[in-house]
Amino acid sequence: MDSQSEEDLSCPVCHDIFKDPVVLSCSHSFCRDCLQSWWRGKLIKECPVCKERPLMSDPPRNLVLKNLCESFIQKRDQRASPESRCSLHGEKLKLFCLDHQQPVCLVCRDSKTHNNHRFRPIDEAALDLKGELQKSLKPLQDKLKVFKQVKENCDQTAEHIKVQARHTEKQIREQFTKFHQFLQEEEEARISALKEEERQKSQVVKEKTAALSKDIAALSDTIRTTEEELRAEDVSFLQNYEAAVKRVQQRPLLEDPQLVSGALIDEAKHLGNLSYNIWNKMKDMVSYTPVVLDPNTAHPELLLSDDLTGVRRGRRMQTRPGSLQRFDSYLAVLGSEGFNSGTHIWDVEVGDNPVWAVGMLADAVQRNVETLPGLFRIVFCDGEYAADSDPDRPATLHVKKQLQRIRVKLDWNRRKLSFSDPDTDTHIHTFTHTFTDRMFPYFNTVTSRPLRILQNPLSVTVNQRCQTK
């Protein structure tokens, strides 16, 4: 019974489990009602399957099959979920009412509730509605994909933050190690100079003290001997008088000793403007660059120098997460600081780079697009120079010799962006535009030859003022 399939116990007419089955002389069985419906209106009563005429018009019941079907239905009902059967009639839900949009059984189909309604087999209706639901699900699946991509980017960003922090910390420590080493060496040199001055001046005072001690001993001896003569008896004194006078006269009167000049430590020399003097020496190891590159805007294929002043093309950096600030369509990078007032000047070393672009980009421009409105730049490509503020209409520039450096000057208040050759002080081109957004320095290169922002020399000016009353 457990291995008996539902198909073997189904009526060939209604395709449902036999109800009150009867058997014909041809051995085919049918539901009694199904057979009577089949024969209704027919003159010749034949088997619906094999078309054989039955020997009797009222076929006998197939009790064995009836019992098997009832047992099968009972076990199936025990295994089947309540949702698969009609709550009103207990029959299996085989149809789907298109008007009520709900599964129904065969009894429901013939009821008044579903009179003149449209029906589909459960499997067909499920297939159609699954297709419609799949279409409705597609936007959610696409949205989920976007959320997963953003989450993956957030995970990459979290890891990249750690990498950035470690790299930046390493750079900071290296810089401060240089400063610490310089300060330590400067400290040792100044302490050594102080010790040397202390040694030299102590030696001078020591020698002066030794000479004074020798003179003091000689004078003291002469005075003591003469005083003893003065205390002697008159006869003895007179007898030794000439010798005593001769002794005193032979001891010449020395000039009064002088204090040692410059004997004290020159504290002013060691401490005066100490911090300034150290800083003034330190300026030789300190550099200033008017524009610093922003790694968070760099295209993944661009490599930046450790001091963030140089950029060149390299292999794609997969560790860099996606960002709204990062270029993806252009091999470009921006300066870290934007300008919306004042005058700003910086020089870029382009060298023999065969393809490059230098200029400025408006802050509000979307960077991952095919064109960049708000971009003002000088482009060098295929040996030619062009002023490019409109990608569709670049203006050709006539430059006599290939540039090694290019100077960028933004005069925000006068609404001018100028380019020149600092080596020959030759003007190249000027954009005149009413800037409204903050403008960021822009750099573009497609080769492994770097572009480098040049450092400005440092100078120290001391304004000395002296007032007297």
Image: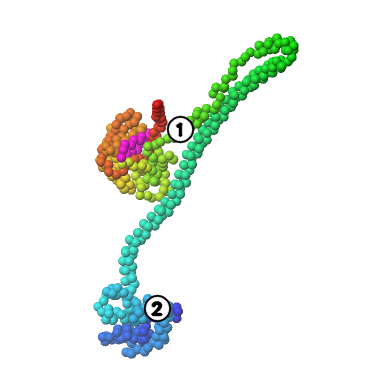
Determine the main secondary structure of the stretch shown in magenta. Answer: strand
Q: Nearer the viewer, residue 35 or 219?
A: 219
Amino acid carrying label 2: it is Glu
Q: Residue at x 40, y 34 (%)?
A: 455
Q: Nearer the viewer, residue 22 or 107?
A: 107
The kind of secondary structure element at disc 2 is: loop
Mark 1 lies on residue: 276
Residue 255 lies left or right of residue 47; in this view the side is right
Amino acid carrying label 1: it is Tyr
Does the magenta run of residues contain 346?
A: yes
Q: Which residues are magenta?
A: 341-360
* Residue, far front: 234
Q: Which mark is residue 6?
A: 2
Q: Which mark is residue 95?
A: none
Q: Nearer the viewer, residue 289 or 384?
A: 289
- From the top left corner, tell me how far across and down residue 309 is, in percent: 40, 38
- From the top left corner, tell me how far across and down residue 27 is, in percent: 38, 85
Q: Is residue 217 above or below residue 58?
A: above
